[in-house]
Image (cartoon, rainbow, N blue to C red):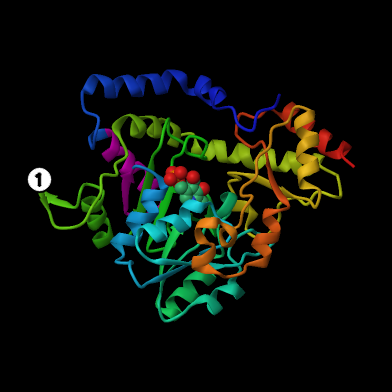
Amino acid sequence: MIKFIDLTREYNFIKTEVNQAIGRVLKSGRFILGREVESFEKEFAAYCGVKYCVGVASGTDALFLSLKALGIGVGDEVITAANSFVATALAVELAGAKPVFADVNPLTYNLDLDKIEKKISFRAKAIIPVHLYGQLTEMEEIKKIARRRGLKIIEDACQAHGASLFGKKAGAWGDAAAFSFYPSKNLGAYGDGGAIITNDKNIYEKLLFLRFYGQTEPYRSDFFGINSRLDELQAAALRVKLKYLDKWNQRRREIAAIYRQYITNPAVILPEGKNQAGHVFHLFVVRTKQRDALRKFLKKNGVETLIHYPIALTRQPVFKKLAGAKCPIAEQMAGEIFSLPMYPFLKNEEIKKIAMVINRFI
Ligand SMILES: Cc1ncc(COP(=O)(O)O)c(C=O)c1O
């Protein structure tokens, strides 16, 4: 069986270093907001090419706290992509604002620039472009729209660690950006974790309070904050993995190239689009009208696949009444897309076997 992802292979590769890092934390006796988190924040900010990073408990919290730090809440609207993971829109709801879904480009799977403007009402305060599957949204154009219409930008970079566009990294484009360190991400922890990056000192300082019960000094809260912290054990592990991120992203691009070379079944549409150089292939998503039958065939032949995501946000029961909008491209794609195994430790013979099975499918 070729699993969708097998994280034990990665652990075996970095075992000595990770065990050492975890041991260092255990011996230190400090588990919350200590030197590991502080160091990771500095290292990750530098890696992304921004000034500040704040470690939090998850990608969902990273989005929610970014919205709070930017002062977005009740009565405000936030425009985002209709095909994201549900957490993007949940975070907007959690902040008290209303998600407004815009349709996506069928080639890049990211926000369709032509569809955004129509969605901007006088209540709109921000755009959350989602760099889905590891490819940056067209950020220069998004920035132009945001500037023209007076909107903030919060990048959802939860699937785009290390991705870039014109040499500028994911997360370095907006007012703030949210990352998830869910274990299967390109940079994954051994549990939940997340971070926000920003170049804005005010946002940074506010976030430090917000993730820590809104406390501005010990036992004095000036803001409605929450408890949302990246912990020392996760930060120590992430520091080890960050050193390999570029190499692992390069391997993901290599895997994508092998898939491209070997998959020849004309019924299967491979990912394409602009800006592929900086794509980090968090997921390798293909498209076909016979999606369910092909997935079944792959499963019968020992290949595990997943769907990211089977329900467009406009069709999610939780958002149906609220948004009421139609995003036909995202809705159609949800019925045709699925994801092939994609992680740096996938072996070449496995990739070729997967391609062979796909090519045998009629
Ligand atoms: C695009 C996107 N946004 C938000 C999230 C939420 O991150 P988390 O699961 O860490 O809360 C994820 C990942 O799960 C994601 O892929």
Residue drawn at (73%, 31%) of the image: 303
Residue drawn at (44%, 55%) of the image: 90
> Residue 255: in sight, yes or no?
yes
Left or right: where does residue 7 sit relative to residue 202?
A: right
Q: Amino acid at mark 1?
A: Pro
Residue 219 vertical position relative to residue 15 in the rendered view, above or below: below
Q: Is mark 1 within 8 Å of ligand 1?
A: no
Left or right: where does residue 225 sit relative to residue 219?
A: right
Residue 153 vertical position relative to residue 357 in the rendered view, above or below: below
Residue 87 vertical position relative to residue 328 in the rendered view, above or below: above
| Quadrant that contains the N terminus | top right
How many marks the image carries: the answer is 1
Residue under numbered circle 1? 218
The image position of residue 139, as x and y in percent, is 52, 65
Task: Choose between 299 and 35: the one closer to the eye.
Answer: 299
Q: Magenta residues?
A: 36-56
For label 1, the SS is loop
The image position of residue 12, as x and y in percent, is 52, 19
Task: Choose between 70 and 311: the one closer to the eye.
Answer: 311
247 magenta-colored = no
Residue drawn at (72%, 48%) of the image: 286
Dividing the picture into quarters, in which one does residue 110 lie? bottom right
> Residue 139: in sight, yes or no?
no
The image position of residue 327, as x and y in percent, is 63, 67
| Quadrant that contains the C terminus | top right
Q: Residues within 10 Å of mark 1 (few under 14, many from 20)?
A: few
Residue drawn at (65%, 40%) of the image: 306
The image position of residue 193, as x and y in percent, is 38, 40
Dividing the picture into quarters, in which one does residue 281 lie? top right
Task: Choose between 177 and 183: the one closer to the eye.
Answer: 183
Task: Choose between 2 and 257: the one closer to the eye.
Answer: 2
